[in-house]
Structure formats: structure tokens, C-alpha cells
Image (spheres, grey):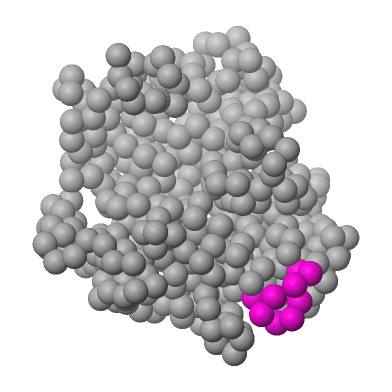
Amino acid sequence: MSALLKQHVDRAYPTISHGQGVFLYDTEGRRYLDGAGGAMTASIGHGVLEIADALNRQLSRVAFTYRTQFTNEPAEELARRLAALAPGDLNHAFFVSSGSEATEFAIRAAVGHWRERGKPEKVKILSRDISYHGMTMGALSMSGHAARRPDYGTLLHPFPVVPAVHAFRHARPGESDEQYAERAAAEFEAAVITAGPETVAGIIVEPIVGAAGGVLVPPTGYLQRLRQFCDRLGVLLILDEVITGMGRTGDWFASITEGVVPDLLATGKGLSAGYSPMGAVLMRDHMVEVIRAGSGVAPFGHTFSGNPLGAAACLAVLDHLEQNEVLANVRQRGKQLAAGLLQLAVRFPFVADVRGRGLLWGFEFLADPLAKAAPDPVHQVSGLFVDACFERGLIVYPAGIAPLNNAVILSPPLTISEDEVDLMLEILEGALEEISGQDFLKPAVAGGQDNPTRQDVIA
């Protein structure tokens, strides 16, 4: 019996032997196409020897230094390069070991900012009712993820107060994207006003909602409107780009696509591409100037914050992304994947609301696309589909919060080839064919032509 505690304690998990490119191989010789990048993390694929070489070089020099005693060259260089890639004047970086730590640091930085400015009453962080910002207590307090919040019971703060931006479900008949963006942003502003701007330190949003919603893409202009009302009300804007950062959407950060500069930007996952636990928070100049003019002390970090080994891994990943023009591949393969998913949605009417950007795509399963009725949650159709894909050698990521959306995320390594995208679509088709016979997925209309999909999100 294994001494390792698993997510499902009695499940027999395959043991991975090694990985190469977009594929993982288990000890029984089975191959799996990593269509989820693990958890939207393995952005340059597995077994990249140049990353291993960079880690070995750093290990032979120094693997760990403590941030209050020393700085180190890899962390200094990584901060410089991220600042150059980030939008606007996000010119300062603090490094942590995960996305959850990054959003926790963002809370401390936001609250500390107002304390430095003589406004200690500004301590609230508002967020949306379908969102996920991490598993630590502060990060989960900011998350509108009904399945994960019970872990802490009543210990969590009730931060999520704003409806999710989900045009498929919440846009009104005849409402344009621009009108919906304006209305959704106004709902957020109204929530801040109700809470009292004098008590609100900041708001936090994912530019594209990942695990909690299955790739919910807001209409163009929504994030810009959030920026505007934050400035108007004196509230900080925090963008959680743990998933969308470092090229996942076809730009270095999704906020670049939207033309928005947040006050704080959290990133992780693809920052190290899974080669080392690493996350970061980028801060605007004005945030650091307030610290410099006040206490002169940044918010506390963690033991491994800014360690040289993790920073060296991230630098090697960044080199790989730039030297191989991976972001151009993201945009090309993203179009290919989107077109294939939309074709599958036409064939299988229960596949609804294909949505995404770059190489971050999702869709959900509906029993009745016209009525937007979800299948009976007892069946957990996304779980059946994930299992069907897994048996065929494809890993996809279950997402969303039943019963409203049984969703799936596709987020393969950004280095995936044209042939490998075709293979992924072929396996997806086979898995959809397998589950299509389920009674709870039989469409209310024939042919699938009335299946609503968001074709305007192809980028």
C-alpha cells in the first residue's frame, strides 16, 4: 500500500515514467497527450533538456539564498525581463512559490498600500462569484468556487460578491458585447459602492476565468471599464494571470490584449512551465513609491521567495519561449484548435459555448442547448468525458461548477504542433462519440445547427 496520500485515496493512478514534448509515458508503456498541460502549467512541454541543463548549472553554484540576507543574479535578471514584458509601468517583481502565494501576496500588498497611505480601514478585496484564486485561506476567500470553499468552512471571508461575466448565460436578448461589458462592469462598480469604497482595498479578477468557469472570456472593454471605475473610486485593480500569463493566450499577458495595466498582476504556472514551483507578483511604480516614501519595507514573503534555482528555471523557460517564437505558434495553433472545436460543436449538439483565446479553450455540456439546461449533475458529464479521453490517451481538465456548467478546459503545451492538434481533436471526437449515447445528453433539437457557440472569440 502506498504511503502517498492521493486526491482520491483509493484510486489506482498510473505512474508516470517520463515525458517528452506534449506526451507523458507511464510505467506500463501507455502514452498520454497532455492536452491540459497538467493544470495549465506545462507550457513548453516535458523533458526539455535545455531547462534541465540550466537547472544543473544553477545547482552547481547555489540553489538557495534567503531574501532578507541576499539577492541573487537569476532573480534580479528574471525581475528585469518580466518588467520589460509586462504592460505599462509594472516594473517591480516579487517572487513566490505558487499562484496561491502570489494572490496572497497581492492581498497583503493591497492592504499594506493603503495602510502606508494612512487609510488602514481599506481592507476588503472584492471578487466574482465564479472565480478561483488559489487554495490558501486568503486566496480561497477571494474565490467564488463553491466546490472548494467548504474546505475551510466558516473561516473564509465572504469576498466574492459580483456575478460572473458569462455572456452565454447572462447576456440579455439583443444585448451587444459592448452593452454587456458596460452592464457587467457597472454591477461590479455598484458592489464596490455598496461595500463602501473607503473600506475597499482592491478588486481581483481573472482576465479569463479558468478552473471555476471553464474559460469564461469577458467581452472586449470589460476590463478597461474596471480599470476606469477603480481609478474613479480609489480602489486597486488586481489581475490574476496565474493561468493566462506567460503566453497562454498568445500575448505575454492577457492584460496586454485588453490594453489594461493593473496595479498588481499575479502570475505563475507557465512562468516556470512546471520545471520548478514558482510564481510572481508584478507591481506598478506608484505602489513601490508609496512603500519607499513610507515604511520602506515590502510585504512579507515565504522561505523560498526569490530562490535562485526557481528563478534560473524561469529564465530558461523564457529563453525557450523567445528563441523558438512560441507565441506565434500559440496564435496559429489556437485558430486551428478553435476551428476544430466549433466543428465538433456542430456535430454534437450537447457541446455548447466553445470559448477561449490562444491555447486556452473550454466548452460545456448541455442536455438542451436551446434552453441552456445542464445535464443532471448526478451524472457529472464532464467527469465521464474526462475519463473517456483519458482511456484514449488524452488528458483534459474538468472545470466549472455543476449544475450550471459541466465544463472542460483544453490547454496543451504552447509548443504543440499542427499534427498534434489534429490528434487531440481526433481523440476528442472519439470521446464525444462515446458519451453521446447517454440519455441525459440527447439533444432537444436535431442536427446541432441551433447549438449556440461563441464563434466571435476565435483569436
Give above or below for 207 relative to 259: above
Rendered residue at 77%/50% (across/down): 161
Give above or below for 73 relative to 40: below
Q: Left or right of 239: which side holds 275?
A: left
The answer, for residue 294, to whether it is visible in the render is yes
Residues shaded magenta: 113-122
Seen as rendered, the residue at the extreme bottom is 293
Q: Nearer the viewer, residue 142 or 370?
A: 142
Q: Position of residue 257 (x, y in %)?
A: 52, 67
Seen as rendered, the residue at the extreme front is 69
Rendered residue at 43%/53% (across/down): 98
In magenta stretch: residue 120: yes
The answer, for residue 318, to whether it is visible in the render is no
Rendered residue at 55%/11% (across/down): 438
Quarter of the picture holding the N terminus: top left
Give above or below for 415 relative to 117: above
Q: Position of residue 458 (x, y in %)?
A: 50, 52
In magenta stretch: residue 142: no
Rendered residue at 62%/51% (across/down): 138
Q: Position of residue 222 (x, y in %)?
A: 68, 63
Q: Left or right of 185: which side holds 346?
A: left
Q: Disc count in the image?
A: 0
* Predominant SS of the magenta segment: loop
- Identify the image quadrant of residue 85: bottom left
Q: Position of residue 177 (x, y in %)?
A: 70, 57
- Identify the image quadrant of residue 211: top right
Q: Nearer the viewer, residue 48 or 438?
A: 48
